[in-house]
Image (tube, grey):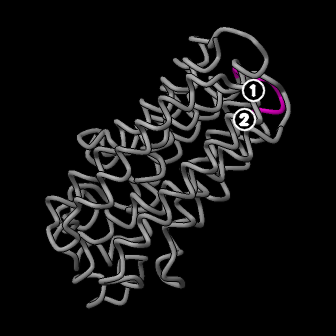
Amino acid sequence: ARLARVDRPIGTWLLLLPCWWGSALAAAATIHAPNLWHFALFAIGAFVMRGAGCTWNDILDRDFDARVARTAARPIPSGDVSVRQAVVFLVLQLFCGLAVLAAFNHMTMAVGTAALVLVAIYPLMKRITYWPQAFLGLTFNWGALVGWTAITGSLDAPALWLYAAGIAWTLGYDTIYAHQDKEDDALIGVKSSALKLGGNTRPWLFAFYAATIVLLGVAGWSAGLSARYYMVLALAAAHLVWQASAVDIDDPADCLAKFKSNRVFGFLLLLGVIAGAY
């Protein structure tokens, strides 16, 4: 359970919410009610695949984790779980994820399977670029495409705009998250946007979040959502403004709290899409 981060559910929410956004946006664009069965399947899939991603990350990063105070007690570096056990657990989780994916149409199965490439390479990015957060954005928001195709059977402009918005959103929230480990990361040679931006982080957060809201506005417009969507989107934008203005990048506890608050943003956006459909 600790290897799959069951005790830290925010990661599952951040993986799941783009799936729900994509599904709800597709339902709105095609004048259908949201598919609650799909919502349930996405919840199971996000839980399993987030666990698989964490397991894979911990296998690859076990030496780094042992040298960082926040991660030294994780199951593999602490010796609670062997690498062999972790690999077996990873395979089981992947099979569960594929079983969930098999409940959808062929297009969704193809799109969902393609995400495994991103899941595989993401943990390596912190070794070669100061922007692993961008790769996390590509990975964690793939569900927007999966959710859309589950309803429509095709990839269309609203889904792509939504996906782009999610990437910008992740650049913001994961930069905040990365500030927790910036001192240890600098010592062991791991790269992050927090280290790259340093004291200039705040204006970049505003830029990332401004791009998020603009792209979400375009996604809603291209899907034909009503004015009610933009009213709720304004509330979601206010939440992001609060995050960027209030976060203390030198306080790890505050960074974690602001990071976790993105679940509120995710649910506000979901509410906006549903409200804008009618």
Relative placement, left or right, of 267 versus 159 is: left
* 155 within the magenta span: no
Quadrant of the image occupied by residue 251: bottom left
Please tell me whether residue 102 is drawn above or below residue 239 in the rendered image.
above
Crowding near the residue tagged with mark 1, few <14, some 14–19, many ≥20 C-alpha atoms within 10 Å: some
Q: Secondary structure at mark 1?
A: loop
User: Which of the numbered marks, if any, corresponds to residue 221?
Assistant: 2
Q: In the depicted view, which residue is nearer to us: 108 or 253? A: 253
Q: Quadrant of the N terminus?
A: top left
Check disc 2: other Cα within 10 Å, few if <14, some if 14-19, many if 20+. Answer: some
Residue 32 horizontal side relative to residue 54, left or right: right
Seen from the viewer's position, the closer of residues 131 and 187 is: 131
Q: Amino acid at mark 2?
A: Trp
**Residue in the picture at 17% in, 62% down:** 73
Q: Are marks 2 and 1 in contact (CB under 8 Å)?
A: yes
Q: Quadrant of residue 111?
A: top right
- Measured as percent of width and height from the top left, residue 61 is found at 39, 71
Residue closer to the observer: 212 or 141: 212
Q: Relative to 70, does residue 265 appear above or below in the rendering?
A: above
- Screen quadrant of the C terminus: top right
Q: The magenta stretch spans which residues?
A: 103-108
Mark 2 to mark 1 CA distance (whole Å): 5 Å
Residue 233 place in picture, x, y as percent: 50, 35
**Residue behind mark 1:** 224
Q: Nearer the viewer, residue 258 or 130?
A: 258
- Identify the residue at horizontal 50%, vertical 72% (top origin): 132
Is 262 situated left or right of 154 in this image? Answer: left
**With 236 as the anchor, is 199 left or right in this view?**
left
> Which residue is rendered at x = 65% and y = 47% of the image?
163
SS under mark 2: helix
Rendering coords of residue 59 (x, y %): 41, 64
> The residue under label 1 is which amino acid type?
Gly
